[in-house]
Image: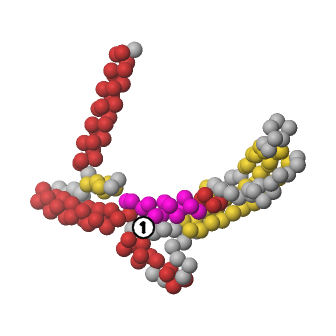
């Protein structure tokens, strides 16, 4: 057992070291990695020029993309919208039912940065400049939500089962959803 533990520990150390070396080979920062291979021809002089120009292009690409590598506001916007739609077909409005309750429903939520419609005129430029935006959209579906008053087991106890599933891969311009 001790030898198995030593082997697993050695493998873990090697795997961590290999990942570290690999991360140093590429230009990476804040979880973003930009990598690629320069084109190669039969002429060594041309290959050197192509390699140097390719490195410049990769650095420019990295500088343009690094602002999109960390988007906490976007993640918060989608998380808040999803938390709202998780309440689809809730029984909160039907409390204290005597035997059972059945509900069904759809809920859609959007978290937007402003209620002023003029704010959205140049939204694409704002995202390009900042790299992050507080926004999110979510849809929730509950095909059936069944609640049972289990007061016969313990006073005030309600049991609930909720089921819903929705998947669409061709909504609008390569946008897909799964709920």
User: In what quadrant of the picture does the C terminus appear?
Assistant: bottom right
Whether residue 174 is visible to the viewer of this picture, yes or no, is no
What is the basis of the colouring in this image?
secondary structure
Residue 78 colored magenta? yes
- Please determine whether, in this image, residue 161 is positioned above or below residue 41: above
User: In the displayed image of the protein, which residue is found farthest to the left?
Assistant: 45
Q: Quadrant of residue 12?
A: top left
User: How far across and down, in percent of the image, does residue 18 sit?
Assistant: 28, 38
Q: Residue at x 26, y 66 (%)?
A: 60
- Please determine whether, in this image, residue 17 is positioned above or below residue 39: above
Q: Nearer the viewer, residue 167 or 13?
A: 13
Q: Which residues are magenta?
A: 69-81
Q: Quadrant of residue 44?
A: bottom left
The residue that label 1 is drawn on is 132
The 10 Å Cα crowd at callout 1, few under 14, some 14 to 19, many 20 or more, is: some
User: How far across and down, in percent of the image, does residue 29 sit?
Assistant: 29, 55
Q: Residue at x 36, y 74 (%)?
A: 129
User: In the displayed image of the protein, which residue is found farthest to the right?
Assistant: 98
Q: How many marks?
A: 1
Q: Nearer the viewer, residue 91 or 141?
A: 91
Is 22 on the left-hand or right-hand side of 168?
left
Is 24 on the left-hand or right-hand side of 167?
left
């Amino acid at each position: 057992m001790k030898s198995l533990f030593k082997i697993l520990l050695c493998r873990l150390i090697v795997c961590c070291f290999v990942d570290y070396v690999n991360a140093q080979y590429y230009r990476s920062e804040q979880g973003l990695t930009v990598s690629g291979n320069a084109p190669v021809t039969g002429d060594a002089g041309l290959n050197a020029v192509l390699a140097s120009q390719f490195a410049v292009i990769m650095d420019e690409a990295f500088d343009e993309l690094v602002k999109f590598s960390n988007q906490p506001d976007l993640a918060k916007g989608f998380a808040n919208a999803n938390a709202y739609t998780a309440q689809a077909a809730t029984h909160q409005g039907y409390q204290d039912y005597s035997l059972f309750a059945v509900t069904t429903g759809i809920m859609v939520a959007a978290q937007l940065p402003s209620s002023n419609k003029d704010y959205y005129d140049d939204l694409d430029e704002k995202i390009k400049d900042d790299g992050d935006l507080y926004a999110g959209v979510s849809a929730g579906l509950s095909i059936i939500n069944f609640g049972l008053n289990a007061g016969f087991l313990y006073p005030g106890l309600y049991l609930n089962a909720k089921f819903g599933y929705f998947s669409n891969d061709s909504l609008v311009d390569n946008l897909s959803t799964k709920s």
